[in-house]
């Protein structure tokens, strides 16, 4: 029995129920994801979406589409790769924290139901990333309090770079 659902894996895009991250009983079956999906669909159908980022922990990754396939590429993959690398460099410039960048499947592992895949394919967001914040596994999901502010500082620097250069 699973004790909780992993929201970043509960999107409608390429959803499969065969992963060790519990995604729920059906694609998009949680109120949180229903709200995000409805809002994203409305924006995508209207003015469009420039940038969607799913922030969570942990691992120090900047992940671009796709997670469901290691061979699929986003239409603007080259641009995404460059922006991700440079965003990672801006993050590292603050406290020396290094982020690995690349396509989700090829860089981390295959995923199903990922929100960045959904926002790329369905809402046609120009950029749709998953950013895994600190750390690389020493503390996992329970980051010590003394790392919260440095995480915010470096994340903010990365976002400022991204917004200025996107």
Image (cartoon, rainbow, N blue to C red):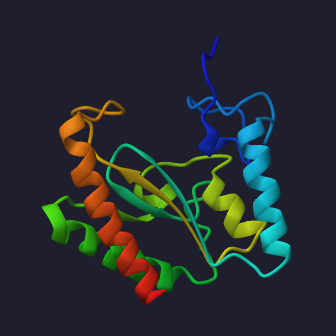
Q: Is residue 128 above or below residue 105?
A: below
Instruction: Give the total number of marks visible in the rendering.
Output: 0
Residue 17 left/right relative to 66: right
Q: Is residue 58 above or below residue 152?
A: above
| Res 99 seen here | no
Q: Is residue 95 above or below residue 51?
A: above
- View extreme (bottom): residue: 165
Residue 125 image offset from top left, x and y in percent? 68, 74
| Res 55 seen here | yes
Residue 41 image offset from top left, x and y in percent? 82, 64
Q: Quadrant of the N terminus?
A: top right
Q: Nearer the viewer, residue 121 or 146?
A: 146
For image coordinates 77% across by 54% down, the residue present is 37
For image coordinates 78% across by 82% down, the residue present is 47
Residue 140 left/right relative to 147: right
- View extreme (left): residue: 96
For image coordinates 58% across by 47% down, the residue present is 111
Q: Nearer the viewer, residue 45 or 75?
A: 45
Residue 6 image offset from top left, x and y in percent? 60, 34
- View extreme (top): residue: 1
Snapshot quadrant of residue 66 = bottom right
For image coordinates 80% across by 36% down, the residue present is 29
Snapshot quadrant of residue 89 = bottom left
Residue 88 image offset from top left, x and y in percent? 30, 69
Snapshot quadrant of residue 116 = bottom right
């Amino acid at each position: 029995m699973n004790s909780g659902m992993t929201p970043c894996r509960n999107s409608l895009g390429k959803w499969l129920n065969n992963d060790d991250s519990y995604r729920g009983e059906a694609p998009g079956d949680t109120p949180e994801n229903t709200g995000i999906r409805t809002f994203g669909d409305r924006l995508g159908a209207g003015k469009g979406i420039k940038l969607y980022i799913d922030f969570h922990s942990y691992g120090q990754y900047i992940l671009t589409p796709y997670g469901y396939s290691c061979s699929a590429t986003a239409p603007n993959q080259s641009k995404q790769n460059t922006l991700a690398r440079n965003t990672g460099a801006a993050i590292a410039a603050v406290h020396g924290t290094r982020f690995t960048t690349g396509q989700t499947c090829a860089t981390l592992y295959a995923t199903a139901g990922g929100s960045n895949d959904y926002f790329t394919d369905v809402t046609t967001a120009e950029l749709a990333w998953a950013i895994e914040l600190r750390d690389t596994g020493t503390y996992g999901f329970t980051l010590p309090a003394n790392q919260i502010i440095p995480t915010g500082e470096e994340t903010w620097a990365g976002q400022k770079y991204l917004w200025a250069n996107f």
